[in-house]
Amino acid sequence: MEELITLKQLLHEGKVAEALEIVAELEEMSKSDKVNKIFSYSIILLLYLIKQSAENRNTKSWETSIFNSVKQIQRTNKRYKSARTYLTREEVAETLEDAYESALRRASLEAFEGSYEVQELGELVDKSKIIQKAIDLITA
């Protein structure tokens, strides 16, 4: 909020260059918030995709969690005043890569009733296929 007050003051004073610096900071803060939300939903999405792959089964609950995570990622990533997104396909892929380890750790607690360690569970699934499936769902 403080940034907006300062921005308004700078514009009233005609200090456009300084005002543009604040606008750039606000844009970066906004994108950072979007990335953090997408990262959080990516962990949930990957968690259920890992469980599906490892256990070679599916449940309505898992499908719903996957659907909801994908919708939240798509919604968070969408720019409403244009047809563009905050994150490119490549940036979404990077975010999924970054979230994968956290998702795998959570999945090791849930898949097979927690009987596998993180590394063991990781060996049961194909990370690249799971990430690609997540990308396909998000960008569909």
Image (cartoon, rainbow, N blue to C red):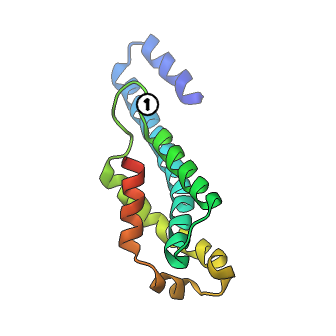
Tally of marks:
1
Residue 132: x percent and y percent? 36, 63
Does residue 29 appear in this view? no
Q: Quadrant of residue 72?
A: top right
| Picture residue at 60% right of the left edge, 28% below the top | 1
| Picture residue at 62% right of the left edge, 77% below the top | 111
Q: Tell me if residue 122 comes above or below residue 98 in the rendering.
A: below
Q: Residue furthest right?
A: 113
Residue 103: x percent and y percent? 54, 68
Depth order, front residue of 45/101 = 45
Q: Quadrant of residue 20?
A: top left
Kindly identify which residue carries mark 1: 22
The amino acid beneath tag 1 is Ile
| Picture residue at 65% right of the left edge, 59% below the top | 61
Q: Residues within 10 Å of mark 1 (few under 14, many from 20)?
A: some
Depth order, front residue of 56/90 = 56
Q: Tell me if residue 4 comes above or below residue 133 in the rendering.
A: above
Q: Tell me if residue 73 comes above or below residue 44 in the rendering.
A: above
Q: Tell me if residue 64 comes above or below residue 98 in the rendering.
A: above
Residue 51: x percent and y percent? 56, 72
Does residue 56 appear in this view? yes
Q: Secondary structure at mark 1?
A: helix
Q: Quick check: 137 left or right of 42? A: left
| Picture residue at 54% right of the left edge, 62% below the top | 43
Residue 98: x percent and y percent? 44, 65
